[in-house]
C-alpha cells in the first residue's frame, strides 16, 4: 500500500507549489466494522476498507493507493500507541 500526501514550497516568485508524494508502507487490511459503516452512513460517507499501519509511519496523508485503486482516508483511529487504523472510501472511476 502507498500513502499519498503532498509537500509544498514557495518558489522564487512567491507562488505556493504543492507536489503530490507517494510512499510505500506496510499495512494490514481489515474489515469495516458494522458500527463504523452505520456511523459513516449517517454523514453520507461510504467506508470500504480499513488498514492498520504503524502510527509512526502515518503522517496525515489524505489518500492511499491499494492494488492500483485510489482511496480517500475518511477517518483515522489511534488504536494504541503503536497502531493507527485508516478508514477509507473509494474514489469513483479513479485508478492508476
Image (tube, rainbow, N blue to C red):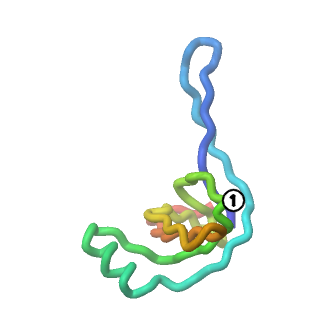
For the N terminus, the quadrant is bottom right
User: Would residue 68 be visible to someone looking at this image?
Assistant: no
Density class for disc 1 (Cα within 10 Å; few <14, some 14-19, many ≥20) is: some
Q: Position of residue 58 (x, y in %)?
A: 63, 58
Instruction: Classify 10 as above or below 40.
Output: above
Left or right, 8 with respect to 42, comes to right
Q: Position of residue 63 (x, y in %)?
A: 55, 58
Residue occupying image coordinates x 53% and y 67% = 78
Residue occupying image coordinates x 45% and y 64% = 75
Work out which residue is located at the far top of the displayed protein and give it: 13
Left or right, 31 with respect to 24, comes to left
For the C terminus, the quadrant is bottom right
User: Would residue 50 be visible to someone looking at this image?
Assistant: yes
Q: Position of residue 46 (x, y in %)?
A: 37, 73
> Which of 84/9 is in front?
84
Q: Position of residue 81 (x, y in %)?
A: 62, 67
> Which of 82/36 is in front?
82
Image quarter of residue 30: bottom right
Check disc 1 and report the residue beneath it. 57
The count of marks equals: 1
Secondary structure of residue under mark 1: helix
Amino acid at each position: 500500500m502507498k500513502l499519498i500526501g503532498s509537500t509544498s514550497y514557495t518558489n522564487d516568485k512567491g507562488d505556493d507549489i504543492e507536489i503530490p508524494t507517494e510512499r510505500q508502507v506496510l499495512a494490514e487490511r481489515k474489515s469495516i466494522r458494522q458500527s463504523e459503516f452505520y456511523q459513516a452512513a449517517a454523514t453520507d460517507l461510504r467506508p470500504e476498507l480499513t488498514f492498520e499501519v504503524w502510527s509512526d509511519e502515518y503522517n496525515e496523508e489524505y489518500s492511499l493507493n491499494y492494488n492500483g485503486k485510489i482511496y480517500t482516508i475518511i477517518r483515522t483511529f489511534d488504536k494504541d500507541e503503536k497502531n493507527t487504523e485508516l478508514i477509507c472510501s473509494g474514489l469513483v472511476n479513479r485508478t492508476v
